[in-house]
Image (cartoon, rainbow, N blue to C red):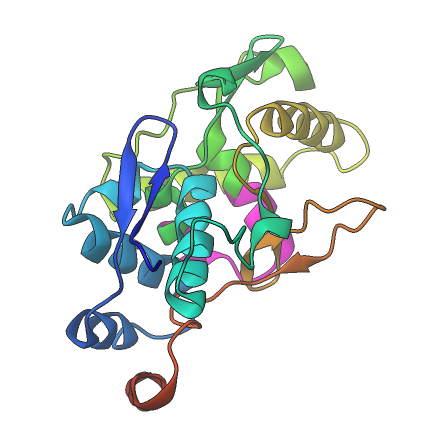
């Protein structure tokens, strides 16, 4: 029996109906290079809450996308595990911490509001790494890299794009000035340690084009894939979306 799937996120649930052609056209008019912005538009249409996508974690956003693609492409059935399960991680929501502390450094979740800004300014995987660090790190960085205190405040998802961008640019400059043989490596190690502990629903990576989703299968298979927001469309709707893009 075909149903509308409801997914349980960290703090709320969301139903995943099919998109109307009007919603799909609205998303397709966003340039395809801006997949995070497209994904925000998709979540806005599905939820009726234009602000939700910015508040959600980056992992929650892709968890929604994977489930929505499976639902609409394969006519989700309760007896069918779905086509994208190999990318999903079994998660107990109550076990996912709000933040992780390493020394006096705090690693926060990467939010939708952050990645929408990052995709507009990051040109390669190095900038994506530093950009995620700029958005997720707070507390005293000196506890990891030494030297004088460097205290960063969290970057709330409620900030405007321009406010988030200004913070990222300032922190880019600081991270770029770190020693490549010591301080930078120490900071990345601490960040990676904390970020791994925050993992939920899917495991994200990044490449020169943005965020990727990494397979969770066994036998060491960690092949990353990129999931585009309108990939599930077919027929006339897909052709129309392609023309608009």
> As drawn, is 224 to the left or to the right of 53?
right
In the image, taking residue 3 as reference, residue 131 lies left or right, namely: right
Question: Is residue 189 visible in the rendered structure shown here?
Answer: yes
Residue 225's spot in the image, x, y percent? 62, 61
Q: Which residue is drawn at 15% across and 45% down?
A: 49
Furthest residue toward right = 219
- 55 or 1, which is in the foreground? 1
Q: Chief secondary structure of the magenta span?
A: helix
What's the residue at 43%, 62% (across, down)?
A: 69
Asked if residue 76 lies left or right of residue 184, the reply is left
226 and 84: which is toward the camera: 84
Say how many tags the image has. 0
Q: Identify the image quadrant of the C terminus.
A: bottom left
Rendering coords of residue 102 (x, y %): 62, 13
Q: Provide residue 40's location: percent of width, then percent of height.
A: 30, 54
Quadrant in which the N terminus appears = bottom left
With 211 as the anchor, is 112 left or right in this view?
Answer: left
Q: Is residue 151 visible?
A: no
Magenta stretch holds residue 171: no
Among the 4 quarters of the image, the one containing residue 101? top right
Q: What stretch is highlighted in magenta?
A: 117-131
Residue at 45% x, 30% y is 109
Is residue 16 positioned above or below 191 on the image?
A: below
In this rendering, the answer to whether 144 lies above or below 242 is above
Q: Residue furthest front?
A: 1
Q: Residue 140: x, y in percent? A: 53, 13
* Front in this rendered view, residue 64 or 27: 64
């Amino acid at each position: 029996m075909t149903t509308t799937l409801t997914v349980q996120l960290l703090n709320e649930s969301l139903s995943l109906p099919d998109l109307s052609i009007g919603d799909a056209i609205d998303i397709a008019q966003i340039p395809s290079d801006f997949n995070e912005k497209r994904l925000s538009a998709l979540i806005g249409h599905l939820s009726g809450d234009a602000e939700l996508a910015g508040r959600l974690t980056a992992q929650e956003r892709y968890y929604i996308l994977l489930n929505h693609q499976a639902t609409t492409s394969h006519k989700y059935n309760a007896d069918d595990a779905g086509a994208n399960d190999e990318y999903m991680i079994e998660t107990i929501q109550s076990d996912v911490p709000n933040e992780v502390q390493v020394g006096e450094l705090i690693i926060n979740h990467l939010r939708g509001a952050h990645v929408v800004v990052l995709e507009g300014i990051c040109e390669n995987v190095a900038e994506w790494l530093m950009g995620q660090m700029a958005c997720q790190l707070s507390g005293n960085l000196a506890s990891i890299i030494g030297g004088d205190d460097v205290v960063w405040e969290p970057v709330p998802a409620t900030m405007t794009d321009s406010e988030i961008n200004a913070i990222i640019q300032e922190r880019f400059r600081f991270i770029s000035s770190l020693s490549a043989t010591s301080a930078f490596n120490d900071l990345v190690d601490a960040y990676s340690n904390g970020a791994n502990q925050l993992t939920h629903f899917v495991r994200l990576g990044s490449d020169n084009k943005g965020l990727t989703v990494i397979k969770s299968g066994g036998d060491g298979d960690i092949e990353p894939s990129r999931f585009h927001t309108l990939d599930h469309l077919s027929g006339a709707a897909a052709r129309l979306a392609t023309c608009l893009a």
